[in-house]
Amino acid sequence: MKAQKTISNTENRSMIEQFKKEVDEGLSGDIKSLPSKFFYDKKGDALFVEIMHLPEYYVTRSEHEIFKEKSETIIEALQLHPDTYFELIELGAGDGLKTKELLRALDKGNYSFDYMPVDISQNALDKLEADLNQQLERVSIKKKQGDYFEVLESLKENQHPKVILFLGSNIGNMPDDVATAFIGKLSDNLHIGDKLLLGVDLIKPASIVLPAYDDSQGVTAAFNLNLLERINSELEADFDIDTFEHQPEYDESDGIARSFLVSTQSQDVYVAKLDKKYHFQKGEKVLMEISRKYNDVILDAILSETAFVISTRITDSKAYFANYVLERQ
Ligand code: AVJ
């Protein structure tokens, strides 16, 4: 494991190279796209926090309800025993709101564990730790800064039972083949009997899903447009933000929400750090993000190519969201 160090966004060398490469690839194709994983700079983080509190964005509230009302069910499904030490590893630090409910229940039940939030952002980890130290002073926190798989690789060396948390339907940003490879790689870094608690948004009518990506205050639009601003500042591009319009789509039959930015005019955009010009036709769409929704059939298809099997499925009262307990075979 590398020593912890502060990485501020794309100041990191390989990260900016990756950013350049993915932006160029995305804008060079016949169908344009931009990589949603780069939404989360400082402003993007703040906008996502705003999104989580929007009346239309049911995703966070639904999963929070599960953790609040059913943490005992989760603990049971994870087959934890107060006298067996385990590592509770969360991929993505988040704001800890949901995890706090689980930590509280584990603390109350005198379970023996370390909570290990993994994140690329040292800043996010420090914030989370400060908050948890205040509210749950008995819980032992071991922050792990770095890439998910680098960290898991290092943790794999010990034989302690592990529970991985991958919440918030973050998996939904990946196309199914990428999600399959990701979960497969996760299973490679675990031992038989280890668990993965996977939070996924469920397929439901467009009348519920679409507003979550098309809020009346325009926060989601700003969240998408922020990536253009980031490309402007970090790759020295000249996107005119006012000439792109946010357009979300959702098709219940495939269960995938897609966010586009549409160019409202014919224009060229120059990206200095790539020394390249990209043409946008009037009405041309740029795919910014997919947010996949799931059901048992879709999840089964993904898991069938990995070493995980579903052991328990826990939903909120409206069955909008599910937390699946998966067991490594
Ligand atoms: C954090 C990936 C789960 O796709 O619902 C929220 C991100 N994008 N609104 C999602 C997001 C627009 C969110 N995830």
Image (spheres, rainbow, N blue to C red):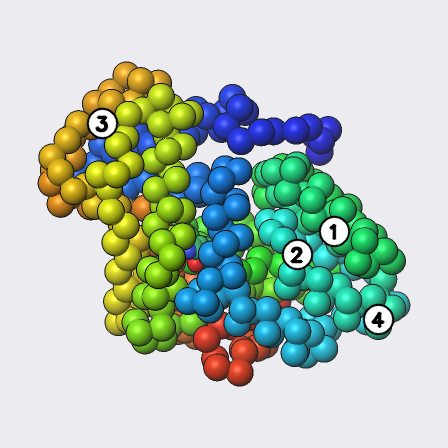
* Depicted 320 relative to depicted 283: above or below: below
- Residue 190 drawn at (x, y percent): 65, 54
Q: Quadrant of ligand 1?
A: bottom left
Q: From this viewpoint, is residue 193 visible?
A: yes
Q: Relative to residue 118, is residue 82 drawn left or right?
A: right
- Residue at label 4? 108
* Depicted 157 relative to depicted 329: above or below: above
Which kind of residue does numbered mark 4 sit on?
A: Lys
Which kind of residue does numbered mark 2 sit on?
A: Gly
Q: Which of the two discs, 4 and 1, sits closer to the camera? A: 1
Q: Relative to residue 44, is residue 166 drawn left or right?
A: right
N-terminal label among 3 and 1: 1
Secondary structure at numbered mark 2: loop
* Depicted 3 relative to depicted 298: above or below: above
Q: Which of the two discs, 3 and 4, sits closer to the camera? A: 3
User: In front: 162, or 238?
Assistant: 238
Secondary structure at numbered mark 4: helix
Which kind of residue does numbered mark 3 sit on?
A: Val
- Residue 261 drawn at (x, y percent): 26, 46
- Residue at label 1? 131
- Residue 128 drawn at (x, y percent): 70, 48
